[in-house]
Image (tube, helix red, strand yellow):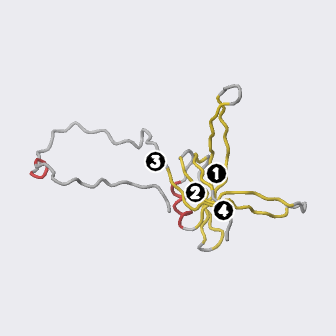
Amino acid sequence: MNNLNSIILEGNLVRDALLTEPAPGFKKCAFSIGVNRFFKNRKNEDVNEASFFDVEAYGKMAEYCGEKAKKGRGVRVVGRLKQDTWKDESGKNASRIFVVAEHIEYKPMKKTETEEAPETQNTAPAEKTEAQTEPQTEAQPVPVETEAVF
């Protein structure tokens, strides 16, 4: 039986993700997220505590991550902790702990001035067609872009 090893983090990317291919056909995406925690201390002062976590994603998730994970973007990562151990040049044991992503959700990007809808031109209105003048009887589905990766 496996012991429980699960983590959920929500924060912002502190730099663009790095997509690599360490072996032919094997994709790996690495990024770091900053997570803020707000609380009041014993003196009733507001405190902001920031923590930074390294995250890795593999396979198809890594490919998608390489496209979407840009600095400043909000993300929610569900995954597990992993520890790498090795001996450094002096023979001492070294290790690092990071998050292996099993699910990543990307928060919507904020529109910048250049990405907003183009200004409308001052032209004469076109004649209405028959389809435009009749009321719609059925609700039309609204397409929704999902940023979640499963």
SS at badge 1 = strand
In the rendered structure, which amino acid carries the disc numbered 4? Leu
The amino acid type of the residue labelled 2 equals Val
Furthest residue toward left: 130
- Residue identifier under label 1: 32
- Residue lying furthest right in this view? 90
**Residue 131 at x, y percent in the picture:** 12, 52
Circle on res. 4: 4
- For discs 2 and 1, the disc positioned in front in the rendered view: 2
Q: Which mark is residue 78?
A: 2
Question: Identity of the amino acid at label 3?
Answer: Pro
Badge 2: residue crowd in 10 Å (few <14, some 14–19, many ≥20): some
Q: What is the spatial separation of the Cα atoms under label 4 and label 2, in whole angstroms?
A: 13 Å
Q: Position of residue 20 (x, y in %)?
A: 62, 63
Q: Earlier in the sequence, mark 2 or mark 3?
A: 2
Q: Which residue is mark 3?
A: 108
Label 4 secondary element: loop
Q: CA distance from mark 4 to mark 1?
A: 23 Å
